[in-house]
Image (cartoon, helix red, strand yellow):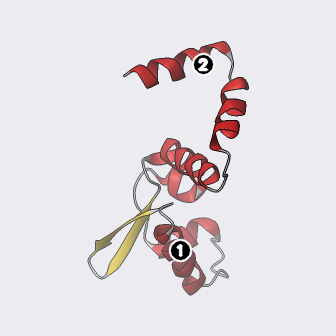
Amino acid sequence: MTVLGEAGRPLTPGEVRDRLDPSGELSYSTVVTTLTRLHEKGSASRHRAGRAFRYGAPDGPAGLIADRMTRLLAVEADRASVLRRFVGNLDADDERLLRDLLSE
């Protein structure tokens, strides 16, 4: 996901493989399988570009982190406790920012 987030544009599986492993030892099919699974989980965007797909991070690094936070929260039955602890760990500036965002 770091490769997709840092690219600044959607990448083909071949471009992802080249960035992960310039030596070319990483299997192309492994990269395709991984990108497909990331797309199915909502962790990567995908669109057709000619005969290939291009994959990207949803909304860049911020979107990626937000998606991770959402998935982690979704598996917890006691969401209120998780959110309470999260908010309790924020510094004053982040707490103000969160209040401002919630009031928008």
Query: Height in image: 24 above or below 54?
Result: below
Residue 96, numbered circle: none
Q: CA distance from mark 2 to mark 1?
A: 34 Å
What residue is disc 2 on?
95
Query: Height in image: 82 above or below 41?
Result: above
Label 1 residue SS: helix
The residue at 62%/48% (across/down) is 73
Residue 59 pos. (x, y %): 42, 47
The residue at 57%/73% (across/down) is 17
Residue 19 pos. (x, y %): 58, 65
Residue 55 located left or right of residue 22: left
Query: Height in image: 75 above or below 20?
Result: above
Q: Amino acid at mark 2?
A: Glu
Q: Label 2 neighbourhood size at 10 Å, few (<14), some (14-19), many (20+)? A: some
In this view, which residue lies farthest toward the left? Answer: 50
Label 2 residue SS: helix
Earlier in the chain: of badge 2 and badge 1, it is 1
Quadrant position of the N terminus in the picture: bottom right
Do callouts 2 and 1 mark residues in contact (Cβ within 8 Å)? no
What residue is disc 1 on?
37
Residue 45 located left or right of residue 74: left
* Residue 81 quadrant: top right
